[in-house]
């Protein structure tokens, strides 16, 4: 297990450094917990998890308060220094053990097949290499382990897709911590060899104007076991009903 940073208030600068975006995101995300219903989304995302969990791209740690008591340990990876500092503070308030560590999604600093579950929450939009990051997710997840995901991506029809792609090629990523609008998380998970479970497409916010970031998906995927599981074993239940 990596050495965490939950015991220290000092966080060193890593290779990902977006201080202006980090401050903006920290402020907006806290408001979205109630205003946009993100608190309820986090409850659904994490319901029923147990054992050892790795959360990739933990941001300012808003998921930590929503992990159920059946979770034995969370290793929370966050590469951006200012967000990681806020995650450290959130970890100290969490009711489950949370170890906050630096590192990139494309090279997770943990052993293979070490986790029962992986949590991806608004992170695939900003990783530098989605395929490599999901390869790492597969590596660290035990056979039969679960992926819980809440991501935004392409949606809204042809006109919106054109807008999302145009923004991706110009100002959006540098202004928003490397975020991309037109990625397709469901297709990416399927292409990476995960077995898709139930998932649901959502609009955020549910009411109001449709934004390039509004098209979200919440659901479950599994790493298919390389060997036949014993009779009677059951995979974790997903957080949503399928489409």
Image (cartoon, rainbow, N blue to C red):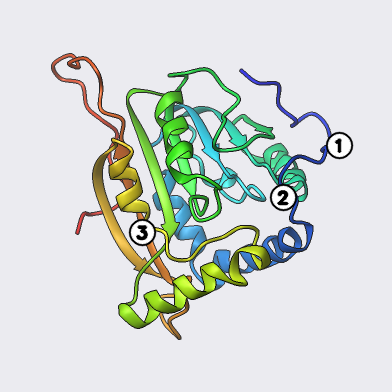
SS at badge 2:
helix
Q: Nearer the viewer, residue 2 or 126?
A: 126
Q: Position of residue 176 (x, y in %)?
A: 64, 64
Can you say which quadrant of the picture contains the C terminus? Answer: bottom left
Task: Report which residue position mark 1 lands on.
Answer: 10
Determine the residue positioned at 61% across, 17% down: 1
Q: Is residue 122 left or right of residue 215?
A: right
Q: Is residue 230 left or right of residue 144?
A: left
First in sequence: mark 1 vs mark 2? 1
Task: Report which residue position mark 3 lands on.
Answer: 217
Q: Position of residue 166 (x, y in %)?
A: 49, 75
Check whether the beta carbons of the residues at disc 1 and disc 3 lie within 8 A of each other: no
Q: Nearer the viewer, residue 48 or 75?
A: 75
Determine which quarter of the picture holds residue 210. Answer: bottom left
Q: Position of residue 117 (x, y in %)?
A: 42, 31
Q: Nearer the viewer, residue 237 or 167?
A: 167
Task: Report which residue position mark 2 lands on.
Answer: 83
What distance separates the C-alpha of mark 2 from that of mark 3?
A: 24 Å
């Amino acid at each position: 297990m990596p050495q965490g940073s939950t015991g220290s208030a000092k966080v060193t600068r890593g290779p990902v450094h977006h201080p202006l975006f980090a401050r903006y995101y920290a402020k907006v995300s806290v408001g979205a917990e109630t205003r946009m219903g993100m608190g309820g989304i986090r409850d659904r995302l994490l319901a029923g998890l147990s054992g050892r969990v790795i959360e990739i791209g933990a941001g300012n740690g808003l998921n930590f308060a929503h992990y159920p008591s059946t979770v034995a340990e969370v290793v929370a990876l966050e590469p951006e220094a200012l967000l990681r500092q806020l995650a450290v503070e959130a970890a100290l308030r969490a009711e489950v053990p949370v170890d906050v560590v630096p590192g990139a999604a494309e090279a997770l600093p943990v052993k293979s097949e070490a986790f029962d579950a992986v949590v991806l929450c608004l992170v695939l939009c900003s990783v530098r290499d989605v395929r490599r990051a999901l390869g790492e997710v597969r590596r660290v997840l035990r056979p039969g382990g679960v992926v819980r995901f809440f991501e935004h991506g392409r949606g809204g029809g042809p006109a919106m897709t054109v807008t999302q792609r145009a923004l991706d090629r110009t100002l959006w990523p540098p202004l928003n911590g490397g975020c991309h609008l037109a990625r397709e998380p469901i297709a990416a998970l399927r292409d990476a060899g995960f077995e898709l479970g139930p998932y649901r497409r959502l609009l955020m916010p549910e009411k109001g104007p449709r934004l390039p970031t509004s098209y979200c998906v919440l659901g479950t995927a599994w790493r298919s076991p390389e060997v036949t599981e014993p009779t009677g074993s059951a995979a974790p239940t997903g957080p949503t009903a399928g489409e």
